[in-house]
Each structure stands twice: as C-alpha cells, then as structure tokens.
Amino acid sequence: MRTMKPHKSIFIALLFLQISSGDRSCEIWSSAGEKVHRTSTFRVYCTFNFKCSPSMYSGHPPSAQHHRELNSTTIYLEVANLTEVRTFSCDCDETRVNTDNKLDSCGLDIEAGYPPDVPTNVSCIFKVADQFSKVVCSWNSGRNTYLKNNAKLCVRTFNHNASDGSERCIASAKGSASFPVGSSVQLISVWINVSNPLGSAVSSVINYNLSDILTPDPPVLDIVNSSSRNCFIKVTQRAPTLHLDVYFKEDNREEWTLHSDLVESNGSVLVRSLLPFRRYHFRARSRFRTGLWSDWSRSVSSWTQEEAPARALNMWYAADHNEKSMRVYWKELDSSFAQGKILKYIITVHEQSSPQTLSARADEQSLSVPFCTNCNVTVSACNSRGCSPPASIAIRTPLAKSPLEPVINHHNVTIYWSKFRTAPPPLEYVVEWFPTGQRLEWLRWVRLGRNSSHVVITDMEPFMCYEGAVFVFYSNNSVGRHMFTGVNTNVSVPAAGPSVQEREEGNTVNVTWSELPLSQRMGCITKYTIYLENSTGHVAAYNISASERFWVLSGLAPSDYSIWMTASTAKGEGKPGQKVKFFIPPPSQVPLIITCGTLLILGGLLLFCACQSSAVKERVWVYFQYCRPDAIPDPANSKWAKECLQEKGKVSLQLQLSTSAVSEEDEDLVLVDVLELPRPLLCRQTSLNSDSEPSTPLHPHTTYIKSLSHDSYSSGDTQTSSLDTGETVEYISSHGAAIMSEGEEDDMEDGPCFFPSHSFSMQPMDFGPKLTLDAVRIGGTDFFLQCDT
C-alpha cells in the first residue's frame, strides 16, 4: 500500500478546510446564541481561517467596533443592554491565498426579547348555530416578548362526566382560537401553551360546562317607524332567545340607558318615553334560558318627530342712550325645551293704542323695537309644530334702589344685595353685566327667584372692565335698580395710551380723545393723564377723571408744544400714546388795525353826516380859512423881473458883510440864505398915498418859499395876484435891503423893509454858475416887514 507524501497531505487538508468553510474568511457566533434576553450582556466571537488583520462591525450601516483578541485567530466584542435586533460582522483585510478572489466576510443577526408570560384571563363561550356549534376561547398573553411566540389552545372533551380520550391543540397567534364540538359533549377542559426561543409557559387548566357558556349570536336591528315620543325597532335573531335587552342614548352622550318597558309585536319592539326632536342610538343583546349574554348588536339611529316648544324664553331688554328705541334680547332654548328646529321668533309690543307684532330670524337673538314706557313686550319661539308660551316683560321706569355690594374674587365676581323692609314683596331679580360702554353689544343677564340675595358671575373675561345693574321687580308693578361699575377679575397696566386730537384757539388748546379698545385697557381705567411739553423741555401733567373725553388747556405762552396721554388702572400707569405737536403763535396786530380803521371810518361817517347841515358847513368853512395857505404871488410879475428881462443880463447881488468878507476867489458867487420868519412879525405899513387906507397891508401873508432853480433867468409863466387889494406883488431879492442898486433905493424908501434872519456865514457859498430871478420865488408877507416912517 502506498503512503501519501507529507506535503501532499497538508495541501489536501487546506483544500478541505477551504471547501468546508464555504470560501469564507471567518466564523462568527454569540456566547448567548442568536436570541438573547433584553438588557443582557454577552460576547460575540469571530474566528478567522487565515492569518490576517481582523476587524469587527456592528449596526446598519456597519460601523467599526473596538474588539479584543482572544488568541491569534479569534477576536471578540463585549455587548451590553441590547434592546433591538442588531447585525454583527467580521472581515479580514488579507484574504488572498493563492487566488485572485476575495473571500466573503461573516455576519450574525442577534434578536433581544423576553420569554413568554403565563397566559391569564382564559375564557370560553359556546356558540350555537343552525348547522354547527363551536367553542371560542380567548386569553391574555401578557407583555410583548419582541420575539415570535408559538401559542397553542389545548382542549380535552368529556361525555357524561367521562373522558372520551380526545385531546388536541390548536395553534393560534392572536390570543384566541376556536374548535367545534359534538352534540354529545357536555364538559371541556382547556389550557394555553406558549413558547419562544427564550422559554415557554403554560396556563392553568379551566373546566367548563357547555350549558353554562351557551351564548346566542347578537341580534340584528332595523328602524321601522318613529314618532315624537316612541320608536318601533325590528329585531332579527338566528335562534329564539328568552331574554332581550334594548339600550338607547341621545346623540353626543356617552352613557347608554336600558329601556326596560318593552312591547314586542310581530317581531318588532316599541321603545317608549322618548323626547321629541332627538337623535337616538339603539343597540340590543339576547340570552337563552341559561348561558351568557350575546355580543352587542350593531347600533342603529333615528330622529323623533317635533313638538311645539314647551318652555317660555328667557328675555331681557336694554334702551339706547336717547330712549328712541330699545333692544329686546332672548336666550336660545335648550333642545330639550325647543322640541324641534326653531324657525322664527315673534315679538309683540303691547301698548295702550294697539299691539305691534314683529318677527326675527331663527339665528337672531335680539331685535330693536320702538321705545315705550308702561308697556309689555312678549317673545315666542316657533317651530313647525307651534310656538312656545310667550315670555313677557314689563317696561317700567326704575324708581326704587336696591343697595348692593360687589365682592371681587380672582376667578369670579360675587354680588350681594339686601331688601328694603318697606318695599313690597319682590317677584324676581334680574342681574345684568356687560363690558364698559358695550351694553347693547355684549349684554349678559341672569334671572333669579324672589328669595335670592346674591349671584356669582363666572363668565367675565380677564383684563376686562365690567359694569351692570341689579333690577328687582315688585308685586305692585314697580321696578328698582342699582347700578355698579368698575368690576374686573384680572388687572394689568394699559397696553397703550389714548390718541390725542387737539385744536388751537389763540392761546387755548381743546384736547379730545377716545376710549381705548377693549383689548388694550387691561382692566378698569381709573384716570387719564395729559402731558404737555414746551420748547424748553418743561413737562406739565394734568390728571383727569376716567369719565372725561375733553379737556381745555388755557393761558399757553407762544411756543412749540408736544402733547401726549396715558391711561391708568389699579395696577398703575400704562404706556404713553403718540405725541402730537402744535404751535401757539404770538398775539396778532390785525385786531388793533381793524379797530383803528373802524374808528376812522365811523368818524368819517359822523363828519359826513354833520356836514349835511348848512350851519355846520359855514362853521367848518370859517375854520378852514385859517388852515388854508395864503395866495402866493408870482415873482415873474415883479418890477425887478421886468427890468432884468429888459437888460437881458444877470442881476448881481452884493452881500454886505458885517463881520466877515467873501474871498476874492468867490466874488462872482452870490449866496442867498432865506429864513421863514414867524407869522406875527410884521411891520406897520405907512401909507404911500393919502387916499389909501393905513390899515390895509401892503402884501398878503404867506409862508411859501420856492426852491432855487438853475433853469432859466426868465419866466414865461406869469400870473396876477388874486388878492383883494389888486396890487401887483413885486419881486424882492432874498439878499436883503443891504444889497441893492442905487436906483432901487429910492423905490424902497416907502416900501416894505427886509430884515435878514441871521448874518451870513464867512464861508463862501456856492449858488451855481448864475442865479436868475425866474429861479426863485419868495412869497408872502412873512419876509416883508412894513416899516413906520
């Protein structure tokens, strides 16, 4: 026999190992198996078939784990608190052994769970049908094992207290199972067996007498007919039963009510004592003479028919501020009293003249009617079957008062009141409340009996200010009322300030504002504050009552101003409102000018009216003569002017100097200084002729002085004096009598004398290139003095 060589035997062994390992690089296993207890600790091992650099992974997607080495070919990983299915795998980085194909890695799925609990609450029923009968059992499997359980229902049957040797198990995975039984079986024994990879459990054995667990199938219900109070239901059953229970409930309610007063007729059941216009749900169950109740039938529902409303409405009223109309309110009837779908409301105002009937839609709960005193108002709700009894209220003017005291809690408001001893017996009380200023929009009320003395209001919104009143109706048709204000449950500072509107009138400003919205008041407003800031930064504050909406700021100095407001509650002052800027201007002069102009116009009118009288005209004319200027003679008509025109030359005036002399350089210049003398300075005239009257002045008085002109030395414009004397006014030079020609001295001996007003200055005076007589006019007797000879 030939023996195999050593190297050949090693090669065959390696080849066998590679084939047996399935071309895998490693083998993986768990110290606790593939199914482990939840939260347990165990190890996962990997043994490699070749020498390589090993690695271990866990999870999905796989993530590298920190493993440990057991020996040169095996590594392991410590696993703790595993609560779910997890995949573990191992791989080798160097798996090439004389081949170009990489060997597969190894992996393992490990599940964590619990062993099964012992089944509890095992119960069985015996259902009898027309063709076959069966026993149905159910049980409680306990907690979730997170593993696949194998449950079996095991049963042993007995005939007349003796075992027939029949025992069997029926697999089940849903916590229930059933099996058929023959007609000869009287007793059964059942138990439950449950197992999984971590263990098994068996319930206790339960024995049943089939007659004790006999159960019919649930009945089938159908609605036949229904009226306002009754309902006919058809009941169908597979096998006749001795007991039948029918339950009903109203819609949107949880509790079922057993209807014990049943009347069966022709397979139908009459359910009585129902309420009108309700939706009812019905269900039923049945039972044999012995055994158990059947399961509940499928529920059916039906509406009962309508009836006329059975109760009067709860109504109240509120008059508007001007008492031209009032609004009647009513509360919606509960469905148990409406007894149908309300279609409309009928409102009747009973006055002395004739009743007035109005109607409102079904979705309305108030209506505006004409205001009346000492009248009655009734309201009725109507459906398809009729109307409710009319609710009536007497409209009376409140006279008496009922003292009360509001007591405020954190979550509700309690209002107490007391009765007057001398008052007639009360019939009822009505307490109304509403947010401040919102009576017609948010009115709420409650009616109370004659013996009531307080009410608890629980529907007041937080951070809302309420007011209201307590009304008491007496037996003598009188009405008492006491109002209350400033009631709130929760309070905070206002969320905003009022918006200011200002109007300037001189140094006075009218400030108006409106109430804050309800959402921003945060309670009852106790006061308002106006802040006024001028241009220098000084701020003045004005506290105002919460009931005011108008304020006047007077006596303001001219300046730029800013104004804003805040509102306050019992918690403090709120946020400021928006600033408004305005300007107070200084006083205007227009009124003074208008006053002066008005006085002048009135004076002129009075003078005009006075001048309509002839006597007044004459008196005014006399005074006017003293005011008018004297007639001014024309110098062109003087003798001197005529001679000058004849010589066609210039007139040279020599100024006689008393204390000074004119320089030689200015000899050709003649300076003339003219002074207007006072009017009383006159010379007495000496008669030139024995026939002339001495008292007649030679020249009329005048103060007129004509300015010097450099135009021409001759004047073509001459005029004749219009004086009463008829004399021609002669031209007199303003240089005085000291500067005259010799030929003229004789003419002036008996004429008027000219006195210069002052001595001429020593300084030279320039009168221009020449002085012509036609350029100067000196008028009047103020410059000619009549000398006595």
Image: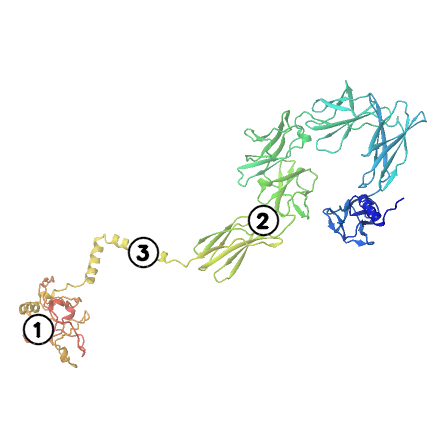
Quadrant occupied by the N terminus: top right
Q: Are marks 1 and 3 in contact (CB under 8 Å)?
A: no
The label number, if any, that marks residue 520 in the structure image:
2
For discs 3 and 2, the disc positioned in front in the rendered view: 2
Q: Which is more N-terminal, label 3 or label 1?
A: 3
Residue positioned most to the bottom:
659
Disc 3 marks a residue whose amino acid type is: Gly
Nearest to the observer: residue 305 or residue 661: 305
Q: Which residue is mark 3?
A: 597
Describe the element under mark 3 as helix, strand or loop.
helix
Q: How many marks?
A: 3
The label number, if any, that marks residue 338 in the structure image:
none
Disc 2 marks a residue whose amino acid type is: Gln
> Which percent across, then down, holds residue 46?
80, 49
Disc 1 marks a residue whose amino acid type is: Met
> Which percent across, then down, holds residue 762?
18, 79
Task: Quote the CA–CA distance across marks 3 and 2.
Answer: 56 Å
Nearest to the observer: residue 318 or residue 265: 265
Q: Which residue is mark 1?
A: 748
10 Å crowding of disc 3: few (<14), some (14-19), many (20+): few
Where 611 falls versus 266 (above or below)? below
Nearest to the observer: residue 588 or residue 502: 502
